[in-house]
Image (tube, coloured by chain):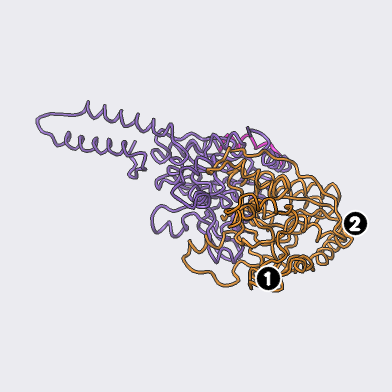
Chain colours: A orange, B purple
Amino acid sequence: MAMAEKPDDPKGARPPAERRERGGWLSRIAPGVRKAFSKKADTPENLWVKCPDTGEMIYRPDLEAALWVTPAGRHMRIGAKLRLGYTFDEGQYETIATPPAADDPLHFSDGRPYGERLASARKATGANDVMSIGFGTIKGCKAVVLVQDFAFMGGSLGMAAGEGFVTAAREAIARGCPLVAFTAAGGARMQEGALSLMQMARTTLAINELKAAQLPYVVVLTDPTTGGVTASYAMLGDVHLAEPGALIGFAGPRVIEQTIRETLPPGFQRSEYLVEKGMVDRVVARSELPDVLGALLSMLMGGKRRAA
Amino acid sequence: MTAPRHYLDFERPIADLEAKIEELSRVSESASGGKSFDSELAALRKRVDVLRRDAYAKLDPWQKTQVARHPERPHFMDYVAGLIDEFVELRGDRKFGDDQAIVGGLGRFRGQAVVVMGHEKGWDTTTRLKHNFGMARPEGYRKAVRLMDLAEDFGLPVLTFVDTAGAYPGIGAEERGQAEAIARSTERGLMLGVPMISTVTGEGGSGGAIALAAANKVLILEHSIYSVISPEGAASILWRDGSRAKDAAEQMKITGPDLLKFGIVDRIVSEPPGGAHSDPATAIRSVGDAVAEELKALSDLSAEQLKKQRADRFYAIGKTGIA
């Protein structure tokens, strides 16, 4: 199971913290100068973003207006705030707190203690862990939306993520509305050992609570969704949507290549391939997601079983 | 006790001593003139027993990983042979094919009809290929779902035996929905209205393992491991160096006592002094006794109570035993 911690696409929408901190020639000749002139963390460091596919320089405000979809159609990875804003009507939503989970239950260290890694991921993203939850309306339809952020330790599924998922499902039940989950992860968080593996079962239980309450659960698979996340809540939706070109699979492409010693066919494990193979219902462009979600949710909530 | 033929690295002193014993006993047998080494042999045998007992009493997580993968360790087919009467294998997922990495069927466990299934790794080249080294494809998990459905329909308990390095990573497996198949198998176990007891008999590797272990009770053998990723896999991701698997094995807390503390497993089944492979019959009997006890404890629960117990069990993980 692939559990890469770092985005395989270094030109993602949010550069990792190490890259920002690394000094160039200026720092070498005049240490401190860079810091003195550096902008605040939340302002764009650069007005131009390089397209990962064509190398073309894209004017950042244009990219933002295009919801971080490049002219070549690449749906760049985005964080939870943007995602929730794009999904809910008028970008308005109520934030639902994710419950804390025990940090570093195994006292894990790979040279650098896991506790430190967590702390720096928190600092870099401003989030406590991978899951963010919002409540609002999508085209008038009430919904709880859960977003998994790849920028936080590769979106990895650990205890906090599992708790986040269970919380989102129960909030949806309490509010009598559907749950929409945007997935993105390299897989399980190995720094939490088998405790992370157990989240596959815990999230599955939560989905079945929704099922018992006859509430829809819609998954939107985003780039990338692999490993234990795919093998649990990402594949148990009533409806599966996917953003164009997202990598979706169980085993990561590198693991498969190493196992079978062949190069993989083009388009393998991409959203479009999963539609063809019967695992995803529809590939939906980011700009169309609210319309499609709104339509789906209102239809699923309008059935006779619910009215009874 | 017959000496196992396959020695692990840490068993080197044991192997050397056993070679000496064999040599001496050959000399002893062929010696004419009544010179016998019986007392020397007895002393040496005693020493080798002590050595083995000591070595197995303090195995580190990486050594346990090796024992868990020992080629002579009892496999699913051995547990079926030792514990299940009238076994009728049921094959195929009714959708695409039959995956022999997971074997299952109906049988009687100490008189009671059950559905039994588990990963089978194979025991020689031919059978290892047939069973794909215990690494299941989607059809294996879909067969598991089918068998759990059968158990539900006829009110039969489900016994599973987990022993896999993980689900098979291949093009065909991905094409046919490996992830979905695993997710559905985990879900089916969690939602069963009949008792389900899982025993990790060897390697409990990742999603491929939990797909058969979403049970009311999860047991683990003393020298088995249960992990989110293999120590080698973790080492290659963390340090880009698979040879640091020993460090990863220690860091990930993959052995019985830690798993028990976290509530990931409910019970550790003791193995014979030299490990399950040194005395398979005893090991299999111990597993049978433990499973029988757990099954008995669940026998009075209703379908709803069984589901609730299972949900409570998994929801509680991470809430206790974390220091």
x and y, in percent, of residue B226 in the image: 54, 44
Is disc 1 surrounded by few (<14), some (14 to 19) or many (20+) residues within 10 Å? few
Disc 1 residue type (three-letter): Met
Residue A307: numbered disc: 2
Asked whether B87 or B56 is in front, the reply is B56
Return the residue nearer the eye: B116 or A69: A69
**Residue depicted at 39% across the width and 30% down the height:** B54
Vertical relation: B219 (above or below) A157:
above
Instruction: Give, as a single range, the part of the protein colored magenta.
Output: B291-302
Question: In the rendered view of the protein, which quadrant contains the C terminus of chain B?
Answer: top right
Residue at the extreme left of the image, as rendered:
B33
Figure disc tally: 2
Q: Quadrant of residue B172?
A: bottom right
- Does the magenta run of residues contain B294? yes
A99 and A27: which one is in front?
A: A27
Asked which secondary structure carries label 2, the reply is: helix
- Would you say A284 lies left or right of B93 here? right
Q: Name the mark on residue A57.
A: 1
Q: CA distance from mark 1 to mark 2?
A: 52 Å
